[in-house]
Image: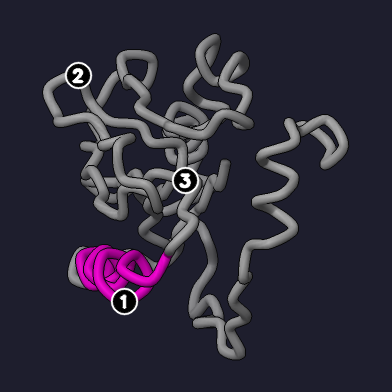
Amino acid sequence: MPSFDELDFKLRIFMKLYRYRRYDTTPHTPLQRPLTECRVALVTTAGLHTPSQEPFDDHFMSGDYSYREIPNTVDVQALTTAHSSTVYDQTGSFADRNLAFPLDRFRELEGADKIGELNDRHFSFMGSQSAPGRLIKRTAPEVGAHLKADGVDVVFLTPV
């Protein structure tokens, strides 16, 4: 990730003038049982999707607030990205998608009985949300409801 001084002039101005929001509450649910008994799901903001899914739309000025369901059976290296950020260096993620979406590593944890089981589906969002209102009010709660309905105990977030 570049330092502030390494960003181009336009991005530095944007960052200085952007009206950041502060949230006084953060949803937190203490773990009720050991990880070895938990159902786990992954959530990423890397803009990943399967080849058959519609890519994220990089024409939204404030960011695409939709999400993609990623099946647990997916070949992680076959995932494609539609991330629109000019400051997100995707070099490592192109070499190994597990850096942004560590599903293969979690399959290993499941096989070694370090976690209970993986959920049947995981979720991908687009990062770089400069106007996150619709994401916060609409799509994030929708994904939360899916995860709750699936009986997920733990979500591992990989923000990029």
What residue sits 28% from the left and 50% below the top? 119
Amino acid type at circle 2 is Pro
Q: From mark 3 to mark 2, how far is it between C-alphas?
A: 19 Å
Magenta region, main secondary structure: helix
Disc 2 target residue: 51
Taking the image as shown, residue 23 lies to the left or right of residue 73, namely right
Disc 3 target residue: 127
Question: In this orientation, does residue 77 appear?
Answer: yes
Q: From mark 1 to mark 3, how far is it between C-alphas?
A: 16 Å
Q: From mark 1 to mark 2, how far is it between C-alphas?
A: 28 Å
Crowd tier of the residue under label 3, counting other residues whose Cα lies within 10 Å: few below 14, some 14–19, many 20 or above: many
Crowd tier of the residue under label 2, counting other residues whose Cα lies within 10 Å: few below 14, some 14–19, many 20 or above: few
Q: Quadrant of residue 103?
A: top left
Amino acid type at circle 3 is Gly
Between disc 3 and disc 2, the foreground one is 3
Disc 1 target residue: 137
Q: Which residue is the extreme one toward the top? A: 95
